[in-house]
Amino acid sequence: MHGPGDDAAFSEAKASTPLDGVSVNRRRQRKPAWGMIALGAIVLLALFAAWRYTPIADYVTAGRVSGWARRVRETPWAPLIVIGVYTPAAFVLFPRPLLTLFTVIAFGPWLGFAYGMTGIMLSALVTYYVGRVLRPGMVERLGGEPGAQATKALRKHGLLAMFGLRVVAVAPFAVESIIAGAARMKVWEYALGTFLGMAPGVLVTTVFGNQLAALLRENGGVNFWIIGGAIVLFVAMTWAVKRWFARLA
């Protein structure tokens, strides 16, 4: 036997229990991405083991890497190839920083940054127009709830939302671009938001690549203070933009 007071208490407890999908999703989102962290650690350990215990270290030497970079730099059409490679790399989800890293080693920090940003903007426009030819409903269904939220944020906030998406990187680069195209976002807002959001990460990669190039050169030295400072500034900016973007969305 129970009275009306018991029913009220039960209803209140049920309402406060995070059994609905939204509450469960929010609770899951607050958990650390231990799976991704573990996967990243395994990949790093595997690369270290391959470098330490296989003939890779004998083949990929500093002299050979410098030679490859020099041959690329001396090839007249190499900049066009480097810029063009960013577009297929976006579709196959190839790590973009690796492309920028090699570009900086081959062409130096200034041209490396310029070629890297040009390739990124070209791939951004190509993937954007892929989204334009698709029906918005199809893209939202393929993107699921994150895709729908990104579409809503882009339609509501435009440039600011695109900047936040690029910095926080809530989805792969090509997916964000296709969603922006399907949302019929203005091209100039999309391009400017992409440029401003991608430039800090490319700049950090450029700094790291320039220091790595110095290490590969004979008698070259690495300034770990520069590398550490760039990484700390980038992480701090990403954290701040992530908090701001959460309130914006």
Image (cartoon, grey):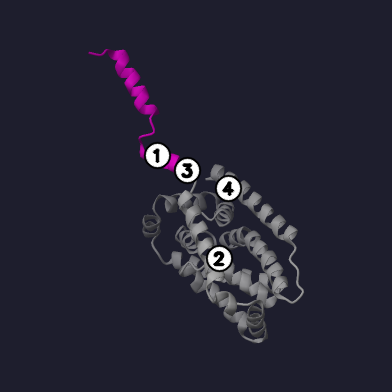
Give the residue at mark 4: 242
Mark 2 or mark 3, which has the lower sequence index? 3
Mark 3 or mark 1, which has the lower sequence index? 1
Q: State how far apart marks 4 and 2 are (Cα).
A: 31 Å
Q: State how far apart marks 4 and 1 are (Cα).
A: 21 Å
Q: Foreground residue, 197 or 97? A: 97
Asked if the residue under mark 3 is in contact with the one under mark 2, i.e. CB atoms within 8 Å, the reply is no
Q: Is residue 206 above or below residue 164?
A: below
Give the residue at mark 2: 48
Q: Foreground residue, 61 or 214? A: 61
Specify start and end residues of the magenta stretch as a single range: 1-30
10 Å crowding of disc 4: few (<14), some (14-19), many (20+): some
Q: Foreground residue, 38 or 86? A: 38
Q: Is residue 61 above or below residue 211?
A: below
At mark 2, the secondary structure is: helix
**What residue is rendered at 68% in x and 52% in y?**
232
Give the residue at mark 3: 31
Q: Is residue 161 magenta?
A: no
Amino acid type at mark 1: Val
Quarter containing the N terminus: top left
Mark 4 or mark 1, which has the lower sequence index? 1
At mark 3, the secondary structure is: loop
**What residue is rendered at 62% in x and 85% in y?**
77
Q: State how far apart marks 3 and 4 are (Cα).
A: 16 Å
Mark 1 or mark 2, which has the lower sequence index? 1
Frontmost of labels 3 and 4 is 3
Amino acid type at mark 2: Phe
Mark 3 or mark 4, which has the lower sequence index? 3
From this viewpoint, is residue 152 visible?
no
**Residue 24, label in figure:** 1
